[in-house]
Amino acid sequence: MGLIVCTADLFSEHLERLRSAGHEVRVVEQGSCASLGSMLSDADALICLLTDRIGSDTLSQARKLRIIANVAVGYENIDCAAAQEKGIVVSNTPDVLTQSTADQTFALLLAAARRIPEADSAIRGGKFPRWGLQQPLTGIDVHGKTLGIVGMGRIGAAVARRGRLGFGMSILYVSRTRKKQLEEELGAVAVSFECLLEQSDFVCIHVPSTPETKGLIDASALARMKPSAILVNASRGAVVDEAALVNALDENIIAGAGLDVFEHEPAVHPGLLTHRKHVVLAPHLGSATTDTRRAMATIAIDNVLAVLAGEPPLTPVA
Ligand code: NAP
Ligand code: GLV
């Protein structure tokens, strides 16, 4: 029936589903993505990852492509305008990864505040610190503090719920639109960006990567934050100016950071690697649980099967 080109390392049951629906699946070997354009020339569908850059050049050779199913909720890696021009549907994987990404965000927040990686390294290095009131590795309280959410969407709201309902935190937020229901449910308060930076003990970033959000957390934003505050970013690296963040950590402008994403991923600013106190780094693991990754693959495949059957996609991007 159709040819599906796939850069994702799909689970065997997903490959089986596509094949038993009568489609041919051509799995692109890691490292062959540079020649993706030519592979798309006779493809009907593409299943890809957020690390694949699908620009107008890649799409120029696609003669009959009907859908690009990104196995991620973020889709800034795809030139959606170029796809639309060619009548190609773009789909993503919203909702199924919201809770696991919120868990990862909160894990980074807690780990940075309570210095878990430093503590782990101390024990592994044979340096179990003596118990004392002012012992090394004392941290920062999380419960009852103020949590600032930048981008109160699906994941932002899930993090806010964890903060309010699990840790008794006060919630401030910035978003493009007011979230009245969350204001009622969590007592969340919509504030200006400047107010959020100045009043929050923890600032969590959950906006997508867009031209408007690029470098949103720059030197001037960091300068507004409390010296005791921790920045957590589990959205996209481009939202934070990493050099400015390193400088803010060097100069004690803020206390720490929990980062799941990086400006030039997979490269990490060397200045971040030298900071250990209240700084926790993870290699883009927000949705990385087996259950969630399976669910993401399932949605991507549902989208492909629907479009190739002439039906509308389940989760097209806006
Ligand atoms: P979402 O529901 O669309 O939420 C994004 C929110 O950002 C929306 O509520 C939107 O506000 C707000 N926003 C957009 N532009 C803004 C701006 N310029 N200023 C202020 N707020 C703005 O998306 P989601 O599912 O929560 O995912 C959010 C992002 O997380 C994704 O785009 C992706 O980049 C990232 N992510 C990362 C991982 C990871 O592994 N680390 C995993 C999943 C997702 P309105 O609602 O007011 O329009
Ligand atoms: C992960 O980063 C995603 O956007 O799903």
Image (spheres, grey):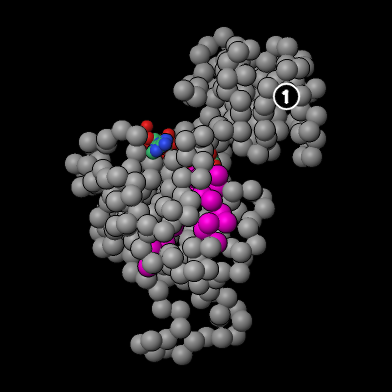
In the displayed structure, 317 sits above or below 249; it is above
Determine if the magenta segment contains residue 183: no
Residue 32, picture quadrant: top right
Q: Nearer the viewer, residue 189 or 9?
A: 189
Query: Is 232 colored magenta in this rendering?
Result: yes
Q: Note whether residue 77 is visible.
A: yes
Asked if one can make out residue 17 in the rendered structure from this viewpoint, the answer is no
Where is residue 138 drawn, in percent x and y? Answer: 41, 78
The quarter of the image that holds ligand 1 is top left
Mark 1 surroundings: few (<14), some (14-19) or many (≥20) residues within 10 A: many
- Image coords of residue 11 (percent x, y): 65, 37
Q: Position of residue 180 (x, y in %)?
A: 22, 36
Q: Provide the residue span drawn in magenta.
A: 228-246
Which residue in the protein does label 1 denote? 58
Q: Is residue 132 above or below residue 97?
A: below
- Name the residue located 52 percent from the left edge and 58 percent from the top edge: 245
Q: Is residue 263 left or right of residue 312?
A: right
Q: Nearer the viewer, residue 16 or 146?
A: 146
Circle 1: residue type: Thr
Q: Quadrant of the N terminus?
A: top right
For the image, the number of numbered tags is: 1
Q: Image point 20% across, 47% down: which residue?
A: 187
